[in-house]
Image: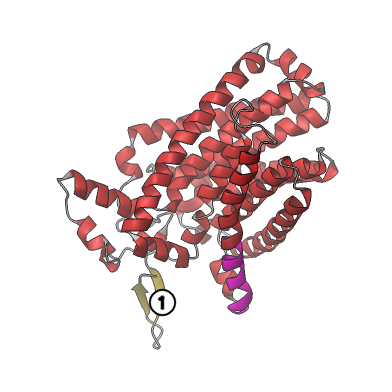
Amino acid sequence: METCHAPLSCLPEAASAGAPSTTGLDGVSSLLTQLDAGYFRISLSLCGQALLWRTLCATGGGGGGGGEVERLSPRALGALAPAASVILWSLALLSLLALTALYAARCLLRFAAVRAEFRHRVAVNYLFAPWASWLLLLQAAPSSLLRPDAAPRRALWCAFAAPVLALDVTVYGQWFTEGRTALSVAANPTGHITVVTNLVAARAAAELGWREGAVAVFAVAVAHYAVLFVTLYQRLLGTDALPATLRPVFFLFFAAPSMASLAWGAISSSFDTACKMLFFLSLFLFASLVSRPALFRRAMRRFSVAWWAFPFPVTVLAAAAAEYARAVDGGRAAVALVLVLSALSVAVTVGVMVCTAIRTTDLLADDGGGGGDQVVSAPPAVVPLETRTASGSPVFSCV
């Protein structure tokens, strides 16, 4: 993955956005220039929180796991989870509506930048994030607002899943047809977002009763994850293989198996052995990452949107732990794990939200140049690609 510190003038709209702005119109123009699809990680994390608390409501509402949860945490989940679920769902909806409106304006007014995102091997993965957010929000919707078997819910799933399938065909098709080195060049940890999005779509389809469609989407996601995991395992052998500011995306490694356990649980209508195996794999990958805090030290020096890669994987892991606790009839160890992971998920999400509120200027800062590890989540708008001339010398140019 290349980094570049060339000026932003390589994009048509960047030249006008680079000058100091004093008017509100120029401020909006600059915002649309910088607001790439990577910012949908914010809504993805908040929608994941809504799904977690919806899962905790279901776990505490009945079955073997619920009683044990209530014994270990008296009235905590019984009274807090339903209210927190509705509040978080509303907050996630507002954030997603705001980001969607801003990105829609970007598509209209900054189409060249959006097209550049689609052509870039890192940024294209974040184009899946808004649809994953909407599908998560659909699953976490309160029953009083949208019944699970309601026709509008099925229509919404089709509307949100259609772009995902279109992106699947386009992105995966390029890997199949562009030569044997296409995947090794394009593979990077952000590719797990595409896997997670397909798994979210599979789980939503299973909850609607479309089991065959859910299995089909799940098969595509699992096949992609297996290839991507092996490819990245062979390439990312050292801590310097990925720029320091982008290292939070390593957490996506355990987000995929966590979401896969939830998706297969919905498809099979039980948290069976396959789900437990995926859950234990995600726990192992999570432990492998948190045992190496030095890996993320340089990424934490300056706040950026990359920090929003932390909450969602932990949240999905906590949701999978809740389903596991219910499947094993609420054993004390399993429920204790649910409480620890849920508390960690809330703490991380709240911490990043506070940092976002305090350091908004850093969130939207121009990272086109500067330090040696500057990498932006959507490189087309900021980071040019490296190409080489016939003599072998590097030349930086925008996609």
Reply above or below: 107 against 116.
above
Instruction: Pick whichever, 71 or 127, lies toward us.
Output: 127
Highlighted magenta segment, given as a residue range: 167-179
Reply above or below: 211 against 65.
below
Q: Main secondary structure of the magenta part?
A: helix
Residue 2 is situated, as x and y percent measured from the top left of the image, at 44, 66
| 265 in the magenta segment | no
Reply above or below: 312 against 384.
above
Q: Which residue is drawn at 37% across and 67% down?
A: 384
Local crowd size for mark 1, using a 10 Å CA cut-off: few (<14), some (14–19), many (≥20): few
Direction from residue 139 to residue 59 in the image, left or right = right
**Location of residue 48 by image quarter:** top right
Quarter of the image with the C terminus in it: bottom left
* Residue annotated with mark 1: 387
Direction from residue 7 to residue 48 in the image, left or right = right
Q: Which residue lies furthest to the top in this view?
A: 74
Amino acid type of disc 1?
Answer: Thr
Residue 243 is situated, as x and y percent measured from the top left of the image, at 46, 57
**Residue 292 visible from this viewpoint:** no
Direction from residue 384 to residue 61 in the image, left or right = right
Residue 386 is situated, as x and y percent measured from the top left of the image, at 40, 72
Q: Residue at x 67, y 34 (%)?
A: 319
Reply above or below: 187 against 345.
below
Q: How many marks?
A: 1
**Residue 95 visible from this viewpoint:** yes
Q: Which residue lies furthest to the left in this view?
A: 22
Q: Which residue lies furthest to the bottom in this view?
A: 390
Direction from residue 330 to residue 260 in the image, left or right = left
Q: Residue at x 50, y 29 (%)?
A: 90
Residue 54 is situated, as x and y percent measured from the top left of the image, at 64, 29
